[in-house]
Amino acid sequence: MQQGQLPDKPLRQSGWWKAQEYQHFAQWYSTYVFARKIIIRLRMDGETAGHQMRLMLDVSCSRLRGFIDAAHLGSAMKKMAFYHNVGKSRCLGASTEPFDHKKHGEDEKAIEEECIELKVKVALLSAEKEDWKKKEEDWKRRESELKAEKDLLLERESDLRAKTDLLFEKLRKSFNPEDPWKRILHSYRLETLPSRQSLARFLQIVPDGLSIPLAPWTFTRLEATESEHRRAFTCGEPGYHCQMISRQIDLLLDLYDKPGKIDWTENAWISHWDSWFMETISFCLPDDCPVVTGRDTSYYTSTGTKRPHSVLYVLPELIGVFRGEEKRWAGTLLAGILSGSGSEKAKSPLVELETKLVWMFYGLEYILGYAAVGPEVFVVALHEDSTGLYKIGKSRAQQLLHFKRDTKGSLPEILICLFNIVRIIPVLGRICRELGVERDIVVFESPRKTVRLNGFKPVKKTYDSEEAWRNVQEIYEAIGLVNEIVIPEAGILLDSQHEYLLRGANIERLIGHQEPVPGKKKGSHLFYPRLSYAAKPRNGPELIEALLDTIKALEHLHKLGWMHRDVRWPNIRRSFDTGTWWLIDLDDAAMSPQLSAPKHLAAASHAPELSLGSGEHGKEVDIWSLGYLIRQTQQLEAL
C-alpha cells in the first residue's frame, strides 16, 4: 500500500484497521495535549503558540500519512475539536483574551478522561486484532489441508487411470494380435456394387475359398446345425482364430437357445433383431468404414417427419444406407407380405420401409434393409420408384431373402448373408460420397431468415422481420412467380402439381405462405421445388449447363425489367429429377435501374457498382456475377 492511500474497503471495515486507526489517532491526540500543556505553562502569546502548535501537529501528522489520507485526518481533527470544544482561535492563540486557568484545567481533565477511554478502545481493538490473526491462521491451515486433500485425490485419480490403462492393455493382449478377420475382409473387398437383379443370389452364395476360423467351442456349437453354408467356417487353432467374431456368433447362438414366444409383442423382438443385424454389421465392418446406428428418430434418416425403427448411418456424412422395420407376429400379415397382396400388406413392415423412405439417393441403384414380423425376417433392397401419383422421392422394397428365427439350421445361411452385406455397405458409402448424396432434413440459418428442407416437401423459409417477409411477397408477386396451390396432407406434391410448377422459367416458385403475428409468430413462405443444396459443377460440361440455365433464368427476369443482384453458387441449385439448374432467393431482386444498393451484400462477391460511390446500378451487375461464377470454378477442367 502506497503512502496516503487507503486500504480496500473490506479491510477498512475490519477490526484490525479500526485498531490501527485508533492507535494512531491516540498518538496524534497525545501530541495535541502535550502541545497545549506547553502553551499553557509557558504562557506564550497567540502568534508564538499558534506557530508551535502547527509545528507539533505537522510532525504528528507526518507519522499518520502512511496510514490514513489527508481527508480522513482532517475529518478526525474536526471530530476532536468538536467533541472537546476547542476553538481554532483558542488552540492556536489567535485570541487576545486573558488566559483562564480554571477553565483550562477543566479542559485538561476532560482531555485526560477522553485519553483513558481511547486507550481502553485501543486495548479492545488490539484484542480483536489478535482474534482476526488467529482466524487468518485457521483459514491458512484449512487451505493447506484442502490442498493436501486435492493432491491426494489427484494422486488416486492418476493411480486409477494407470490401473485402467493396464486393464485395457491386458484386454487388448488377450485378443490374438493375428486375428485373421481383417485379412479376410480385405481379401473379399468389393470394388463395384452388385446389380439389383443379381443381389439375392449374391447375398446367399458363399464366396470362393472363404474360410472363417472360429474358436473351437463356437465351431462345435455351429457344427451342430444342418446347413451347407457351414463349410465357410472352420475350427481355428488356439492361437489363430477370429476371436471377436466367435464371441458375436456365440451371442447369436444364445438367442437361438433362448426360448421365445411367437406371440411376443413388437418391442420384445427389437433387441433380438438389433443383435442380428445392426450390432453384428456394425461390429464386423472394416475400420475404414465407420458407422453409427439410430432407432426411432427422424433426423438424417431420409424419412421426413416419420421415424424408422432402425437406421445404420455411414460416417461422416450420416447417410442411412441400411434400415429396418419390425412388427409383432400376425399370420395374415406374413401371408400378405409373401403374396404381395391383401389388406394386411398395407400394415406390414415392408410397406413401412417404402412409405417412410424419401428417396434422396439419386445415382445409387439401391440401399439395403430388413422387415421383420415376429420371428421371421425379410432382407430387402430399397430402390427408387418413379411410378404412381408422385413424381419424385418415392421408393419400393424388393424382397431378397426370407429367414425364420426358430429354424436353427438357417443360422450359417444368415451369417453368410450378413458377411456379404458387410462387403456391400462400404461400397454404398463410397458411392454416396462420390455422388454427393444429401440428407433430407437440413436447416440453414442466416442473419435474415431460416431455411428448412424436409425431403421433397416445399422449402420453408422463415423471416426474422415482418418487413423482410412482405418484401419477398411483393417481389415474387410482381415477377409473376406466385402459384398458390393446395398441398396434399402427405406434404409431397402430386405428379400434376409437380409438372405444372416446372413449366416456364427455371426460377423457384412461391406456392404458399403463413403471415406473421406480431410478438407471437414469424412469417414464412413455402417455395418449390426442393433442390440440391450441395451440388456444384464437377467438370467443364456441367459448368456450361449451369451457366446456360442461369442465363435463361436471368433473361426471363431482365425481360420483365428486374435484376437479381445476388447471383452466386449458393443461389444456383440443381434439380434432383431433371438435372437442370435453378435460380433461387430473389430476396434482393429489384427493378432496373436503382440508385442505391443493399448494404448487406458483400463487396468481394458482387459487382463494384453495388458497393462503390452512390450505388447506382442496373442489369449489368447480374452479368458481372456470371463472370464471377466462372472465376470461382477455375479448378475445373479447361472448357
Image (spheres, grey):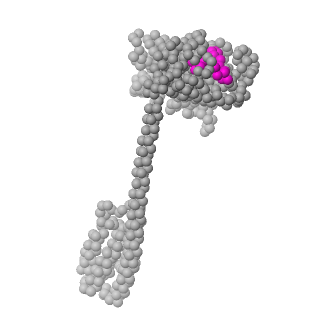
Q: Is residue 221 left or right of residue 81?
A: right
Give above or below for 99 relative to 375.
below
Report the front residue among 70 and 346: 346
Where's residue 286, x and y in %? 48, 23
Q: Is residue 397 magenta?
A: yes
Q: Quadrant of residue 492?
A: top right
Q: Residue at x 30, y 69 (%)?
A: 64
Q: Is residue 354 left or right of residue 1?
A: right
Res 224 seen here: yes
Q: Quadrant of the image for the C terminus?
A: top left
Q: Quadrant of residue 339?
A: top right
Where's residue 245, x and y in %? 53, 25
Q: Residue at x 36, y 85 (%)?
A: 109
Report the front residue among 313 and 447: 313
Q: Quadrant of the image for the N terminus?
A: bottom left
Res 302 seen here: no
Give above or below for 41 relative to 365.
below
Q: Residue at x 40, y 27 (%)?
A: 613
Q: Is residue 99 magenta?
A: no
Q: Residue at x 38, y 75 (%)?
A: 123
Where's residue 440, x and y in %? 57, 24
Report the front residue among 332 and 539: 332
Range of magenta residues: 392-417
